[in-house]
Amino acid sequence: MTTEREEEQTIADPQPEQLKAMLEEEREKAQTYMRNWQRAAADYQNFKRRVEEERSENARFANAALIINLLPLADDLERAVQTIDKALAGLTWVEGIILINRKLQALLEAMGVAEIPADGERFDPAVHEAVAQQPGEEGKVLSVIQKGYKLGDRVIRPAMVVVGKGRDATPPASDPEEEQNAAEEA
């Protein structure tokens, strides 16, 4: 049996084997703490990156919402400028409206908005919305009803277009009297 005094002496004066075991134990703890700290630091960096990405994404969505609401105004202003009567063309207030239209177009371009090319292009459902078909070259955009726009590489409004459906193979409509005579003969 060991006495209390021997136990105290063993604790107070550990043997070299015990010291090595305790040292190894403490090293393992230190390595565990270090790995946990590194993992926490990496998690924090990833968190910061995700938060920054979300902020920039939210800013892009806010810009997109504003731009989507401005596009009808830009379309109306452009139509107004295109339909100005030649008799009014030299008036200063008309020139002011034309200048406002240019500034609005420049602002949209500065925000990263680009018009989607459509007239005469091949129909692309990713950027065009077909609203009608007419005889013409199949799959080709014949006319643009409403311009489409991209913000960066993202479509914010597809172009509304009329698409060619190929040459009309049906014969021209005949006179109703001729149709009735043909039906009576049969």
Image (spheres, helix red, strand yellow):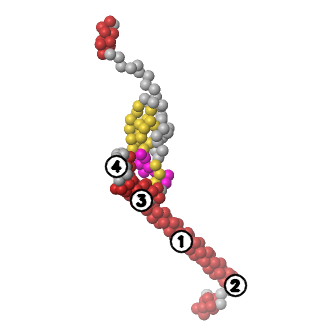
**Residue 134 lies in quadrant:** top left
Residue highlighted by disc 4: 88
Mark 2 vs 4: CB contact within 8 A? no
Q: Amino acid at mark 1?
A: Ala
Residue highlighted by disc 2: 16
Q: Which numbered marker is on residue 40?
A: 1
Find residue 21 and report its horizontal and vertical position in percent.
Answer: 65, 79
Q: Quadrant of the N terminus?
A: bottom right
Closer to the chain start, of discs 3 and 4, is: 3
In three-dimensional space, the C-alpha distance between marks 1 and 4, rounded to whole angstroms, equals 70 Å
Residue highlighted by disc 3: 63
Is residue 64 visible in the rendered image? The answer is: no
Q: Residues within 10 Å of mark 4 (few under 14, many from 20)?
A: few
Closer to the chain start, of discs 3 and 2, is: 2
Q: Nearer the viewer, mark 3 or mark 2?
A: 3
Mark 1 vs 4: CB contact within 8 A? no
